[in-house]
Amino acid sequence: AEMGDSAMFLFEKRYDALRDPPVLANAFNGTCQMGQLLLRGYEQELTNGKHLRNAYVYAGRSEEGMFKDGEESLASSDPRMRLFDLDGGNGGSGGANEYKDKRPYEEPHLYYRADDEQRTLMSGQVLLRGLWGPEIVADAAAAATATTDNDDGEDPIIVLHTADYKYDVLGSNWRDCPRLEDLEKEANESDLFQKFNSSDEAVELRRIAAQLGTNFDTDDWIDCLMTTMCTDRPLPDVLNDYDGGDDSVFQRILDFATYSSNYKLKHNNAAYAKLGMGPLWHEMLANIRPVVDGTPKDENDGGGPPPKMALISGHDSTLQPLLASLGDDVWDGTIWTPYASTFLIEIHKLKGDDPTFKGKPKTMFRLIYNGEALTSRVDGCPVDSDLCDASILINLVTPFAKIVDRDCKSSLPKDGAYSSILATEELLTTPGGVLIFGSMMLLCGFLGSVGTFVYLTGRLPMCCCTRRSGRGASVRGSSVSREHDKARESYSGISLPERNGRDCGDEGVFEDEEPHTSRANGEQTHGAPTTSHVPATVYGSATESTAISPTKAELDDSELI
């Protein structure tokens, strides 16, 4: 090998190239991309992955250092929780044969989905490292020492499914569905919100915001407050009064911002949340329905067997509308989604003839949000059980779990280029519209060609007459050159991507996730994994563990599928 071929080295990325403010300057200098995942978030997501491994992976061997001292994993102690049984013994149904052709972290066993943001991509990747670390390390070592003719020599690969961030559906995207703006406007103009927004408390908090030299933009406030506190940086004096109570200015502003931002998600039977999350619920049901029905996935959804685990790494703007769409009792919107939050949907299969389950459906589901089972809060589910008929969940979300046939047409007036874009998109939805659009393009091209010919030659096409054009041609040539230069400048500006983030600091500011119970320990991440068709993990925050499981009678006669 050439010298240096196997050497390992790193690059350090620094945002310090623009040094002429205010003409040319970065929003913030430093070594972090705005909005990127920080080290504390990395550690939280790694812990999340280990919790998932604890709950659902049985490797048939001791895994020292994976869990707390002396703690036995749930998958080890209870064979019914072994979604991935890598050993196949002790009552398990998996084993080496099941993963002979495809590793457990490869498709079709695992489906990994994220939007195209650094923090969400890395949140999911780090979680998967915690979940499958021992297997990935072993497979990578085997690949490094394998001979060239050995099929086992391939490095571990986990496929990531993503989309253009601008058009993705892991949040309520008004670009895909303009009517979301109508519903937000309707919520903000409602009597209840107007009363809240004009209250004495609102007036006082806006006065404080003005003292700080800023407007009260709710999303920015939440991001700035919590990223500052969770990274142990100093707050302005007027906000530096948080003592764990509800009367501090810090907590009052946080509560006000949370209610202001989340109100639209709850208004009018969660119409905004249901419309915005329809495409994502469709994706999730594409993995859940085949498990419940015992059938392959629909060809339009990729076909083949459904994955054992589907991991979706998104934002607080993913989790909160998902929760809101399930009903008022499931999520009240008063507490912002903590960093490193997880929302889990398990599918259980009942077995045996125990009279306890007489007349019950064979397939059940369980919802777990940050270690707390929420199943009993779903309308139609028993209040004394963590398991519920899977058809109730499917029937609840199916009416709005749509990609097409959504009511997305906006009635709000649009101005300028945006109105033209929407009109063009609507025109192109019908065959007649496509014909009209094509004809208009041909006509415009023809007229443009004729106009350009006349302008440059001073005569009509097919005309034998000529004109003196020496000076005119020179002027016209100069005009074309100037327009070309302007176009080049325009393209130069467009080619520079805009970094996303918030004006909250210089160490990698988060844009969406919000801590709650873990304020004191100051841990954070950005990008909240949402797992559909996966057995629930057993944890609360990244530093605390709480065992949440169905009642003993239910688990005695059920297993994860």
Image (tube, rainbow, N blue to C red):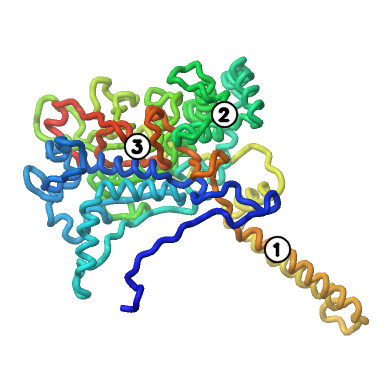
Q: Position of residue 14 (x, y in %)?
A: 52, 55
Q: Position of residue 175 (x, y in %)?
A: 56, 46
Report whether 43 appears left or right of 190: left
Residue at image position (17%, 36%) is 69
Q: Is residue 457 visible?
A: yes
How far apart are the alpha carbons under marks 1 and 2? 41 Å
- The number of numbered badges drawn on the structure is 3
Q: Which residue carries the number 1 mark?
A: 489
- Of label 1 and label 2, which has the lower sequence position? 2
Residue at image position (72%, 68%) is 445
Q: Which structural element holds mark 2?
A: loop
Q: Residues within 10 Å of mark 1 (few under 14, many from 20)?
A: few
- Of label 1 and label 3, which has the lower sequence position? 3
Q: Which residue carries the number 2 mark?
A: 236
Q: Which residue carries the number 3 mark?
A: 342
Q: In terms of image quadrants, where is residue 294?
A: top left
